[in-house]
Image: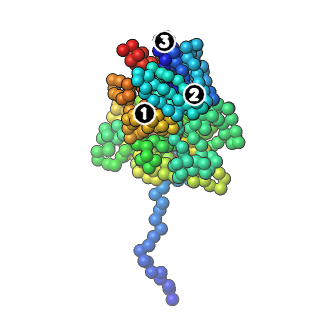
Amino acid sequence: MAKHVVVIGAGPAGLETSAKLSKMGLRVTLVEKEETSGGHLKNWHTLFPGNMPGLKALESIKEGLDENVKIQTNTQVTALEAVNDYFTVSGHNGWQEKADAVVLATGFKLFDARRKEEYGYGIYENVITSSDLETLLAKGNLFSNHKNPARIGFVHCVGSRDEKVNNLHCSKLCCITAVKQAVEVKQLFPETEVFCFYMDLRMFGRHYEELYKEAQEKYNIQFIRGRLSESTEDKEGNIIVKVEDTLLGKPLRIKTDFLVLMTGMEPAAGTKSLTAMLGLKDVSDKFIRPLDEVLQPNFTDMPGVFVAGTCSGPKSVSETLADARSAALAVEAFLKE
Amino acid sequence: MERKSINFGYAIVQDRQIDFDANKHEICRAVAVAEPTLNLCISCGTCAATCSAGLFTDFSLRKVILLLKRGETEGLLKEVSKCMLCGKCQLVCPRNVSTRNLVIQISKALINGKP
């Protein structure tokens, strides 16, 4: 009988790992705490840099699933135990499976922007997050109560590179997401002035720099180097932004109709609880530390337990999928031994 | 009898803050139309690092562009007139900004923008 792998978390990483393991002839049970699979991707309107719809990407990933993959939804994993040469995985609802290997694909959660109270999220109506913006774009009613916003601001690094919220790490995707969203806003509202407030612009990926240049050249999006100190609301409901224009060495005050906070990535609750449950190593950012970040990015220090996707650090969808395939190969190699 | 006020040495200090909403942005818009590569500047400072005029004066094209973009145009004409139009900055700009023409267009817009 084919060996059995339990994959925890049915976001892009879990789905892709399961699909690949199944192709290798293994039996897979994919456990998901929510009602449906897809993770954050199902709520994301479009992906950079080519603007592929999130749902379309998700559909393609799911096409890889077959009858060897059993999906167990509405199940929160509460126990994972190594017993002799197998694992026992149990859920809150009494669900239990034996597994020859386990893949953690428990992913990330978005930073709760209310923790940066001075930015006004949850206090001022016109301060929203990058995730809220994706939802509004998907629904097609962006700024529906505001026919033509005069000015929109994007704030980079919200919850990232900020030790005041205990996050030293860079979430790395917010820079390019801000550029993508700024362009999308300009396409919908060409008359709107768009500003990005940043500390550094980390355009590390292929085509990112080109998209950044296009944002400047074609859409006249303004980039102001300076981290938001605080935002306030005037009596018309506009958001007043105060930053230091660090390239001019002067404080700057500017009125915006809407302020979009680019929230960063933190390990999901499931990632944290499984890390603790298994006694796995984590690093200062609380994401799981693989056995070797360069050579064995999918092995953990517990033989038979693997990681895929963003539970081991921020990744784009394409990086997540590549990591998931790599995890499937690692599992196959382990089970052959 | 003439009353003289005593000078205690206090004065109202001008706010250093850039008030983006109070500033006028027509000059920047006019320059962007005349020389669209203005928008490509990433404030890297290569222009200022190579600038011959910058060796002897405090002229910095990087700073001039930023002041223009923020609408801080007071005194900018004097600033931009320090440029000798040698064009070295154009040779080094990584974003291919047409810096020489940009300087000319900034001067023109500032002169035309005067009442």
- Spatial CA distance of label 2 from label 3 is 21 Å
- Mark 2: secondary structure: loop
Tell me the quadrant of the picture where the C terminus of chain A can be found: top left
- Residue lying at the far front in this picture: please name it: A84
Question: Which badge, 2 or 3, comes first in the chain's sequence?
Answer: 3
Name above or below for residue B104 compared with residue A23: below
**Mark 1 in CB contact with mark 2 (< 8 angstroms):** no
- Spatial CA distance of label 3 from label 1 is 26 Å
Chain under callout 3:
A
Three-letter amino acid code of the residue under disc 1: Leu
Q: In terms of image quadrants, where is residue A45? A: top right
Q: Position of residue A252 (x, y in %)?
A: 49, 51
> Residue at horizontal 54%, vertical 26%?
A96
Name above or below for residue A310 compared with residue A22: below
Question: Which badge, 3 or 1, comes first in the chain's sequence?
Answer: 3
Q: Nearer the viewer, mark 1 or mark 2?
A: 2
- Mark 1: secondary structure: helix
Chain under callout 1:
A
The residue indicated by pointer 1 is A278
Pick whichever, A297 or A243, lies toward us: A297
Name above or below for residue A187 compared with residue B81: above
**Mark 3 on the same chain as mark 1:** yes
Three-letter amino acid code of the residue under disc 2: Trp
Three-letter amino acid code of the residue under disc 3: Ala
Q: For mark 2, does the 10 Å Cα neighbourhood hold few (<14), some (14 to 19), or many (20 or more) residues?
A: some
Does residue A208 appear anywhere in the picture?
A: no
The residue indicated by pointer 3 is A2
> Residue at horizontal 60%, vertical 27%?
A73
> Residue at horizontal 53%, vertical 29%?
A90
**Mark 1 on the same chain as mark 2:** yes
Q: Report whether B75 appears left or right of B25.
A: left
The residue indicated by pointer 2 is A95
